[in-house]
Amino acid sequence: MTDTSRDASIQHDSAATDPRLTDALAALTLEEKVLLLTGHDFWTTWPIEKIGLRRMVVSDGPSGVRGEIWDERSPSLNLPSASALSSSWDTDIARRYGAAAAVEARRKGVDVVLGPTINLHRSPLGGRHFEAFSEDPILTADLAAAYVTGLQDNGVGATPKHYIANDSETDRFTVDVKVDERPLRELYLLAFEKAVVEARAWLVMSSYNSINGVTATENDLLETPLNSEWGFDGVVISDWTAVRSLASAEASQDLVFPGPDGPWGEALVAAVREGRIDESVVDRKVLRVLHLALRVGALGSDGPGALVHVEDGIAFAREAAAEGSVLLRNAGELPWTGSSLGSVAVIGNNAAFARTQGGGSATVLPEHTVSPLDGLRAALPDSDISYSLGAVVHDGLVGIPLDQMRHPENGEPGARVRFFDGSGAVIFDEHRLATELIWFGGSAPLRQAAEIELTLTLVPAETERVNLGFAATGHGRIWVDGELIVDEDVVPEGTDLGAAFLAPATVSSPVDLIAGEPREVRFLYTAVERDDALANALALSVGTQPADVDAERLIAKAVEAAKSADVALVVVGTNAKVESEGFDRTTLALPGRQDDLVRAVAAVNPRTVVVVNAGSPVLLPWSDDVAAVLVGYFGGQEFGHAIADVLLGISEPGGRLPTTWPAADADVPVLDVTPTDGELVYSEGIHIGYKAWLRQDAAPAFWFGHGLGYSQVSVTGFEAPDRLAEGGSVDVRVTVQNTGERRSKQVVQVYAERADSAIDRPARWLVGFASVRVDAGATETVTIPVPARLFANWADGWQYEAGEFTLSVGTSVVETPLSATLTLEVSA
């Protein structure tokens, strides 16, 4: 980590001295300048032809690039979740991940990706942690900087988010996070610093929440440390609707989204005309927006540059999923030898209907996804592979599969969607290939629509009773073969605007289906009049869910399948009501009867392997009772192929935990995510994650940094200088030896501690790491830089405590067999 105490003014003043930018600025009227500071619509900025400025397209990420429309007809690459990426502990994988996202962005005409998300895993209940990296700021910072580099090397702007202390979702629009200056600097800001100072991120996104009484978009933290200390010369873009007043225009907030409406516009023009805000404040913001345009090739005639790093997105998604998979336990069971597997019992809702990504605005629509069941069947064509549901996990509707629906007019696969105005005239008509629909930008006339109709012919694949229904906020009706079966008003669950939009409540009614017998389905939605920032956006779904579930019977069927199989693979996981944007979790327990299912299967088949399909920690109370536990996270569209690769030893399970996994909710030292009287107090200070666990008696199920490979790679040597000067850095050398029979990966981790410190410090903290791959029987040495800055504490500036620190090296925060003493020398 670079020492940022130096004067960084040269960096953040660079836009003001570039004649291409100053000339463009001089050609603009005040009204045109202000126009540039609010989005043109949901996803684009304003073009101004006279200065050669085209529009810039921004897009949700960070685990894929959706583009301007949320539409299954324009599919996107679905990369593994950020928690899977961080589990690789590999900056090269992170750089390639950013590069792959940039390739996708360029394909979709996107200039700016709204990612990476690098808020910390302060509490495991955080509902959006799948989208963020880690509980540790150093691991987060290094991976975030690499991601930003990969993205921007390919000419696409990166947007580290959400600045700052947006580490949970409950009341996220209004919560006031109370956090002392020291943890703010040493944890939450530190996670962002390297992406700005070293990777030179072109944007940063300001968050919804307040920090110590001031909302983020008006907060002085946008100037200090971001601009004045770190030398940020990019654009501070708001989270969508986070700018709520003209006061934010006086802060170092540069760009407001979404547009075209917002609190600046005419009000800001008037404030400048009346002398309440100096025009130089506006000019600085405009110069930054123009600088961004220059960087992405939107200003002038040059256009974006050539790709520097080319990645095959699908192949990389598979590789990254394997690199991020964490083998928590292995009682000699894995890897499997495919030729010896005559029969495999695959069990679990998520085995056939895997979650490849978390819910919310980060969602993309991939062209295909591969489930673990699909992956194993492809990898083991000669094995007898059975499937049992075992337990219902999905909560809510499942969209009608494309191969079971026909357009009512032309008979082609898909559904017809029509928009009607108040007189009943059709004003929009489209052929859709899914029944889970979101309009978030694009050409659909949402503001003009009085009603929206979805019609299709349903051709069931199975004879069964299902609940057919809809999910949307407002009034909806469903007819089947002309019979009205649902007629309901649906109100939002909770007060979070984003959750109400992205995860509306569901109503349904039972319908008996016969395989191959067509049914005519019509859904009619009455549009809700709204005047909020998402008035021109809509989410609605038509789909099914099981009508009656006999939980005991499902488990019994799975047990019968497991009894007769050579091995059993149980895939457990979360659902969209557990991990998503807009709300936090209430427990770390797996939903439904999944724990009972695992215990029952393990009791009849000692070769039971469990794959965990969750984006962040869950409780695994049966982990000691099964042969192996593999965490696959939300593994992206190639998830199933990657899981098969790891299970069969084609790929190494490359991951190590970036966040501590508890054994029980009650053990977690920092759990609270619920504000009291509008405030969420970070009373734990600098002690979150493993730093907090190390201060208490209760131990977690699996420690930070833990993970197993398929060979025995041990730390056998450690060399470190005995002195380190304030402001400097030292290189430590770590030797690892593979005493096993196959090439394998190890993640070498270096921690610091100081037992006799005069200040409150963590018991130990991460100061460096490196991934290394070692051939069977071979020895490798890795060099890891350790900067003095990571020994500093914040007290009205970075302070250095002279004296001896212990450096420990190992393979997790509690597995550190070798150590050395390092003396920090401080100038007088």
Image (cartoon, rainbow, N blue to C red):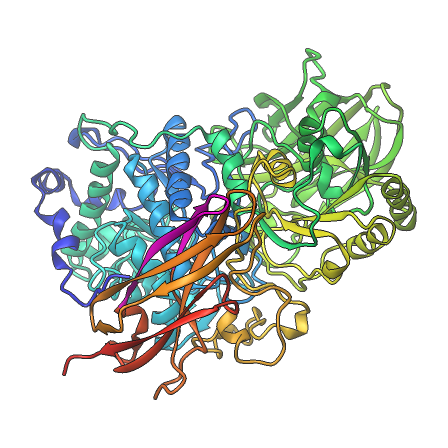
* Position in image of residue 735 (x %, y %): 39, 57
Q: Residue at x 40, y 62 (%)?
A: 717
Quadrant, the C terminus: bottom left
Q: Residue at x 70, y 54 (%)?
A: 331
Indicate left or right for 545 with 299 as reference: right
Between residues 340 and 681, which one lies in front from this camera angle? 340
Q: Quadrant of residue 415?
A: top right
* Position in image of residue 395 (x %, y %): 73, 47
* Position in image of residue 341 (x %, y %): 76, 34
Is residue 208 visible in the rendered image? The answer is no
* Position in image of residue 145 (x %, y %): 33, 51
Q: Magenta stretch: residue 795 in it? A: no
Q: Which residue is drawn at 57% across and 80% down?
A: 696
Q: In which quarter of the image is residue 545?
A: top right
As drawn, which residue projects farthest toward the top? 410
Q: Which residue is drawn at 81% across and 47% down?
A: 391
- Position of residue 88 relative to residue 685, above or below, is above
- Please give the range of residues in magenta: 769-787
- Position of residue 639 relative to residue 140, above or below, is above
Indicate left or right for 104 with 822 as reference: right
Indicate left or right for 521 with 818 as reference: right
Indicate left or right for 209 with 611 as reference: left
- Tell how many labels: 0
Magenta region, main secondary structure: strand
Is residue 700 visible in the rendered image? The answer is yes
Quadrant, the N terminus: bottom left
Q: Magenta stretch: residue 780 in it? A: yes
